[in-house]
Amino acid sequence: MTVLVTGATGNVGRLVVDELVARGVPVRALTVDPERAALPGGVEVVVGSLAKPSTLPAALEGVEAVYLAPYARTVSRFCELASGAGVRRVVALSGASVGDTHPASSGHGFAAVEDAVRAGGFAWTFLRPGAFMMNSLGWASSIRERGEVRSVYPRATQAPIDLGDIAAVSAHVLSTEGHVGRTYELSGPEGISLEAMAAAIGGALGKTLPFVELTPEEQVAEWVGAGYPEGVASWLLENFAVTDREPQVPTGVVEELLGRSGVSFAEWAKGNVAAFS
């Protein structure tokens, strides 16, 4: 069974390629930049993108299963082409924000992807990770330049997940049976507050990082100043407020599917020291 990995240069897709190769699964990678992707030997490469449906027929020919990166704008056309090409199985990366009502929520796009894949008649599985550990890279410039973490709601508690665990689950679901029609809510192995995340990054750096608590207004101003649209800043603030009131807890799905613990935030921080140095 050949699996087409879309977005194979992306943060998750590139790791999915490695995970499938490690499992001995034949992989075709769809990427706009094969050189930058530095794909493993033996991976078939098709230059293209979900954003350019004209590149998809060649990528889909002879493929039985697809890892689908979330790209709502052209997902309906992808489904038409995939169905016509005889694709039977689609594992789509979605998100825990499905169902959010905020106008700027990413959940609207994820829901559109899920709806199109369901309507396409595929044997589907949806993966809905929550917060990514890599979101903490947003603190990197403040840590490097000021030696501090600046954020609203220091006690807001999330259960962030490492991208490698998302990729491992994706490959597992694509290469084993029993996952059709399932929606998996993915999280990291622990609930951890923002101030505890900052402490873990400081521990990885070998120093204490002061946590400067911002007011909601100050946080929105910093996000907007960094280029975030006001609507997105408002949505992010709402998410932090919710996890301040209602701490997230791990779903345990990564552990259940992979038979091992997910990567902890402290492990992730140690592996990403260079980004904060």
Image (tube, grey):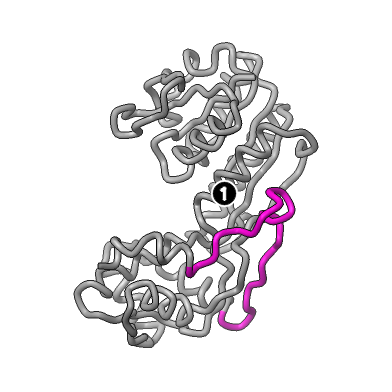
Q: Residue at x 73, y 27 (%)?
A: 121
Magenta stretch: give its range: 244-266
Residue 226: percent from left, percent from top: 26, 66
113 displayed left or right of 39 = right
35 displayed left or right of 65 = left
Q: Residue at x 19, y 74 (%)?
A: 145
Amino acid type of disc 1?
A: Ile
Q: Quadrant of residue 232?
A: bottom left
Q: How many marks?
A: 1
Q: Residue at x 39, y 77 (%)?
A: 203
Vertical position of residue 43 compared to residue 90: above or below: above
Residue 198: percent from left, percent from top: 41, 78
Q: Nearer the viewer, residue 26 or 59?
A: 26
Vertical position of residue 173 compared to residue 187: above or below: above
Q: Secondary structure at mark 1?
A: helix
Question: For the residue carrying disc 1, how many other residues have a C-alpha within 10 Å: few (<14), some (14-19), or many (20+)?
Answer: many
The residue to which callout 1 is attached is 166
Quadrant of the drawing holding the N terminus: top right
